[in-house]
Image (tube, grey):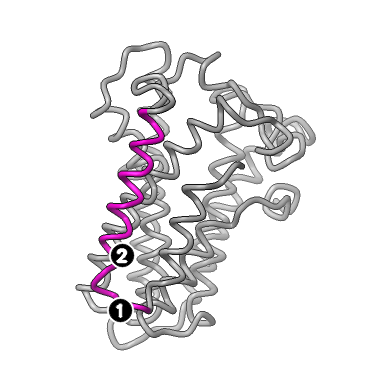
Amino acid sequence: MRYSLLAGGKRLRPILCLAAARAVGGKESHALPAACAVECIHTYSLIHDDLPCMDDDNFRRGRPTSHRVFGEAVAVLAGDALLTQAFASVARTPPNRRYSPADLVSELAHASGSLGLIAGQVLDLDSEKKRVPLKKLVEIHRAKTGALITTSLRLGAMSAAASARSLRHLSRFGQALGLAFQVIDDILDITSTREKLGKSIGKDRSSGKATYPRLLGLAGAQREADRLTATARAALRPLGSSAAPLLAIADTLLRRDH
C-alpha cells in the first residue's frame, strides 16, 4: 500500500478536493478525510489497471509497478486494501448542516463503482483494437477519469456544507476538467518521455486503444483540450474570486508536460 500511495504523483484529486472546500468558504481541515480518500481510490485504480490482466504496465510514478515488485497477488490485495481504506477515511468527515458522513460515502461509492470508474475501465478494455467514435470515447473517459475528478470537487464542497447551486457549478467544472486532463494525457503518451511522465509511454498505441490524438490528430486533440478548459473555466464564473485556485489548476493542467 505504502509503496504505491507514497510514490509521488500530481495529487490532483486531493488538491481539487481541498480547493473546492475553500472555494465555497469552508475549512480545508474538514475536507482532509475526503482528500485522503480520493487519493486512495486513485492509487488503488492505478495498481489494478497496471496488472497483466488489464493494461500490463511495468512502470508507474517513476518506479516499477506494484505487481512487478511484490507479485500480482500482493498487488491485488494492496489495491483492495486502499479501496477499503478510502471509505474508512471519508467516513471520518465531520458532519455539517447539509451533509452527513454517509452522504459523502455514497458520493464516493457512486463515482468509484459500477456507474463510474469501474464502468469506464470496462468500456476502455472493450474498446481495444476497435474503431471507436468520439462520442463513445467521451463516454469512456467521463466515467474512467472524469467521475473521480468531479467527485473529488464535490466531496470537498460537501465537507464545507456547499449549496446545491455550488455543487452544480463544481460538477460542470469537474466534468470538463476531467476530459481535458485525459486529452492532454493522450497527447503526452505520444510526445513526452518515460522520464518526464514517470510511466511507460506509447502503450495506448501498442494496445490499440482509442485516444483523442488517434481520432482528432495531435493538433485537433490540443484544440479539444483548449475548448474543454475554456468550458471548465466558464463553469466557475458564478463562484467569483473564490474559485481562483481552481482556475489556476485548470490552466496548469492544460500546460503540463508530465
Percent from the top left, x then y, of residue 156? 42, 71
- Local packing at callout 2 (Cα closer than 10 Å; few below 14, some 14-19, many 20+) is many
- In magenta segment, residue 70: no
Q: Nearer the viewer, residue 205 or 64?
A: 205
Residue shown at the point (45%, 83%) measured from the top left: 94
Is residue 32 shown left or right of residue 64? left
Checking the image for residue 162, the label placed there is 1
As displayed, is residue 152 above or below residue 51?
Answer: below
Identity of the amino acid at label 2? Leu
Characterize the magenta stretch by its predominant secondary structure. helix
Front of the two marks 2 and 1: 2
- The reply to whether callout 2 and callout 1 are in contact (CB within 8 Å) is yes
Residue at the farthest bottom position = 97
Checking the image for residue 170, the label placed there is 2
> In this picture, which residue range is highlighted in magenta?
220-241
- Local packing at callout 1 (Cα closer than 10 Å; few below 14, some 14-19, many 20+) is many
Q: Nearer the viewer, residue 203 or 126?
A: 203
